[in-house]
Structures are given as structure tokens and as C-alpha cells.
Amino acid sequence: MDKTAFGRRFVRDFLTNKYLYAMMIPVIAYYLIFQYTPMYGVLIAFKNYVPAKGILGSPWVGLDHFQAFFDSYYFLRVLSNTIIISVYSLLFEFPAPIILALMINEVRSRRYKKFVQTVTYMPYFISMIVIAGLIRDFTDSGGVINTLYSYFGGDGTSMLQHAGLFRPIYILSEIWQKIGWESIIYLAALMGIDQDQYEAARIDGAGRLKQIWYVTLPGILPTIVILFILRVGNLLNVGFEKIILLYNPITYETADVISSFVYRKGLLEFNWSYSTSVGVFNSVINLTLLVLANWLSRKVTKNSLW
Amino acid sequence: MITDRSLGRRVFIAGNFTFLFLISFLCLMPIMHILAISFSSGAAAAAGKVSLWPVDFTTAAYDNVFGKPEYLRAFWVSIQRVLLGTALSMALMIVTAYPLSKDPRQFRLRTFYAWVFVFTILFSGGLIPTYLTVKNLGMIDTLWALVLPTAIPVFNVILLLNFYRNLPKELEESSRIDGAGHFKTLWKIYVPLSLPALATTGLFTVVGHWNSWFDGMLYMNHTENYPLQTFLQTVIIKMDFRFIKAEQAELMVKLSDRTSRAAQIFVAAFPILIVYPFLQRFFIKGIVMGSVKE
């Protein structure tokens, strides 16, 4: 019933917008092949995938892979590592661009402003490989950061060999790479604040700090809230690219996160079904968190993504 | 404008200035340092004498890098993927953004397609199913595996989409009245008007393709098909940790490796540093334009 109604709407829409549809053929093909086929491929999380039998022909195993993951020693380790790294970056990396934007906003010289912006945006465009290369060189014995660290009690050996140092290295390099780029959006929000509000605040006798507190911060609060929701929604979404370039078996205990675990199990150990089930677990939690964070924010602050 | 000349204010301005200068310096320092190492002699780099200026200037590391056929081959693969990938992405991005920018009254199922599009941001097949799809299509070890799976970058489409939405509706209406169809309207009106937005998204795509490394490792079984960043990954990962308590001789070997590695890192970042000033000019405007909803 519902289906035929949709079918009729589709036909009518198709006829009125023939050329629009003709235009969309490659797009629809792309989405079917490269986005929705893999979604269908997620079925292997509930099967024992055997390449020769294909996705449909492989035997169903239900939730066995999920069970195996929850029961394994790795479950708690990768889950807590993911959460800890996420929370650290929420605490340290999230506020950094806000502070930078506020500071840039206080600069009166346009040229200096431009200079700071140009230079701080740049690291964002440098490839992960180059970043990892820099980190490895600097933290290796004889590298700049390593030498610096040895004044504060480092033993001079490669810092990536110490499980306790992995997270600080990860977070600090993350701040280094993203602080400028992420400040753009706050700067745009700051430019949108009505200058009359500052004028009014000044007339009311508000000093600089009070102006920041009562005018600037409320002005960019919606932006902060939206970006915060996105962050919380991505709490379990720590990307593996940087992790797998920097970790090694010695630092797995602090560095191994869900996505790097999925990568190792699936592509290095060929446990395709198991790895996919871990990935599905991750996606489901992420989606739930995003919906929850959005709901909470709409209740509390009236700002939300949808 | 009332100017505040109190002591506290002046201290703040000076402090702010200095702090921002330090941050800027920290952003540049790593690249300058790696450049300095790459132009220094192995011995100087080993002794930790190099800071921001080369010591015992030599181009040996670069001669070494450019003498390596596998490095040059990887460089060539990267250039190919950038050219093919960007051309393909731009074309697809335009034909994705244009229909989605239409009014739902005209394009009834727009909302449906918008959801089809947005849903892929919220949920995706994940690593293994995507890999299996590409494998089943027989694209392993071909350039297609590097350009097709990421051919429609969502972020860029949204930028372009918002740009199209903000164009006056009258433009399209008048061109339709003159008898132009969707293809003509898109090509003659939307594309020329959106050149700044296209330049922004195009440069993003170029940078994305140049920087991407993981897909190369995932989809290429043979190392001679590796793009530059993937090739470089093998070089960087190979850094050997067994030398921690090494003899002096071994340390020397390892650390003149260091200048060569520095040179390779710098060459990999170089094209980005070249396009960056152009990119920079566009992207702020492009992003601000694209992120404003009517």
C-alpha cells in the first residue's frame, strides 16, 4: 500500500523532472555501489563470511561475533582507550580553538591577524603521513621533543615506546594540527556578533572581560553547542589513521582504540566477520550518542542539529 | 570608538601579541626543522646540532630521494590520482549539488534523496564491507580503487549545495523561460556563477587526494602501485626501534637515514605548501558562504 503510493509519487516525479533524473544517474549509481552495497555487506557481521560462498551463501551465526567481542580481553581495553582519548580531546582540544579565536578577535592590526590565521591554518592541510613522520622524528632519540623531554626526566629513548606518553603525544599533535582550522568557524561566528551590543555594554560600564563574558560568549554559544554535540556524538569515533601510524605492540595498552582494533582484526588477521561486528557495534553506539546529545541539547539549550 | 589606554589593557595587548606569535611560530617550526635536517649532513643531524638552519649544507638527501625509482613512481601514481580523482569528483559534485538545491515543490522527492545522501554520513558500511565491495568490483590494484569509493565528498557537496541554494531563484526561472533545460541552466548559469565555490571544493579535493594514504595500502596489493603517501608510510613505519641502545656506528647509519627521511617527508608536503596560499585565499570565503543557511 505504502509502497505503491511511493511508487506512484516516484513515477510522477520522474516524469516531471526527467532531465534532473538523467543528471542524477551517475550519482545514484555511486550511492548504490559505493555506499549502500557496503551497508548491505554489514550482514557479514551476523554470519561466518566465507569469500567463496558470498555474503548470502555464508552461514548465519547470529550475535556470536558480538558475544565473542564482549567476552574478550580486548573489549574493555579498546573501549576504555577510545573513551579516554575522546574525553581528553574534548577537555583539551575542544576549547583550544575557541580560545585562539577569542585571542585573534582581540587583535586590532588586520595584517597581524591575517598572518596568524594563515600560519595556524596551515598544519591542517599537511598529510597524516607527514605529521606521523614529524612526530616520529621529533620524539625519537635525538629528536627535538625528545631532547626537550630529557630535561624533564625523559630517559632519551624513543618516546613512542612508552605507553604512558602515547596519549599526550596524540592529543598535543592533534591540537597542533587542528587549532587554527577549527578556529575558523568561531571567528565567523564572532564576526556575526552585532557591534551595537558592545557599544551598549560599554555604555553600561562593562569592561573588556565583562564584554567577553556577556556579549562575545553568548554570541558564539550556539556554535559551541552545535560543535560540542557533534563531538559527543563522535565520542567513540577515534580515527585509526594516526593511531596505527604511531602505535606499536608496546603501546597497545594505551593506544589501541576500537577503529584500530577493527583494522587489525579485519585487514591484518582476516577475521572479516568479527571485525565487521566490532565496527557495527561502534556505529550503533555512535548513532545513539549523537541522537541523545542532540535531544539533550534541544531540551537544555534550545540549540540542536535537527 | 572609545580607545582604552590603561596599563592593564596595554599589558593584555602585548601579551596577546606575543602569545599569538608563539603559536604561529610553533605551527611553522616543525616544517622548518624538518627542512633544515633534510639539507644537513648525516653527522650533524645525528649530533643534534640542527635546529632551524641547515648545518654542513648538502643536497645529498635529495639526490638520494630523487635517485630512487620507486619514489618517483609513487610520485607519478599520486599525480595521476589527483588529476583523475579531482576531475571525477568535481563533475559528480556538481550533478549531486544541483538537483539537491532544488525546491521540493519542483523536485518532489528532493527530501527523500537528501536523506539518502545524509544517511551515509550517519551510518556507513565500515572498513571491511567497503573493502569487499571494491574487491568484488575487480578494482584492486587499479587507479579506480583510489578515486571511485570517495568520489562524492559529502562536506564539499554541502558547501556547493548551500551556495546554489543562495543563488537568486529568478536566475533559474528566466533561463527556463528562455527555453534552457536543466543541463543548459546548470552549465551556463550555475557553474560560471559558482566558480569561487568550485575553486574551493576543487582545491580541497586536490589536497585530499594528495594526502590520502590508507586507501593506497588497502586496495593496492603491489607496492609499485602505491601513491606517494602510502609509499612514504612504508618508509616511516620502518623506523627501527631496535637501535635504542645502539653502538655509535649503527647510530650514525640510522641517523643519516634521518636526513633522507626528512627529505622524503618534506617533498611529500611540498606540493601542499605550494597550493596552500591559493587555497587559503579561497577557503575562508567559500566556507563562510557555504555555511550560511538562507
Image: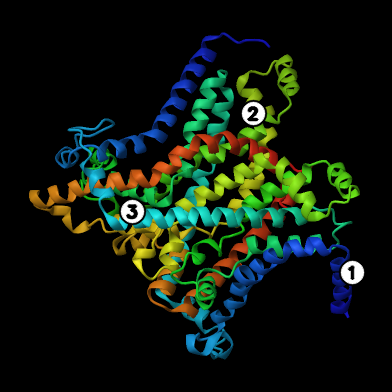
- Mark 2 in CB contact with mark 3 (< 8 angstroms): no
Q: Chain of mark 3?
A: B
The residue under the point 72% across, 20% down is A201
Question: Of discs 2 and 3, which sits in the foreground?
Answer: 3
Crowding at dot 1, Cα within 10 Å, few <14 / some 14-19 / many 20+, comes out as some
Q: Amino acid at mark 1?
A: Arg
- Mark 3 in CB contact with mark 1 (< 8 angstroms): no
Residue A232 position in % (x across, y down)? 59, 54
Which dot marks residue A12?
1
- Mark 2 in CB contact with mark 1 (< 8 angstroms): no
Which dot marks residue A213?
2
Same-chain check, marks 3 and 1: no
Which element carries disc 3, helix, strand or loop?
helix
Asked if A303 appears above or below B71 in the picture, the reply is above
Residue where numbered disc 3 is placed: B72
The residue under the point 41% across, 68% down is B220
Q: First in sequence: mark 2 or mark 1?
A: 1
Q: Chain of mark 2?
A: A
Residue A205 position in % (x across, y down)? 70, 15
Q: Chain of mark 1?
A: A
Which residue is most to the right? B177
Same-chain check, marks 2 and 3: no
Q: Is residue B171 left or right of residue A24?
A: right
Quarter holding the N terminus of chain A? bottom right
Quarter holding the C terminus of chain A? bottom right
Q: Amino acid at mark 2?
A: Trp
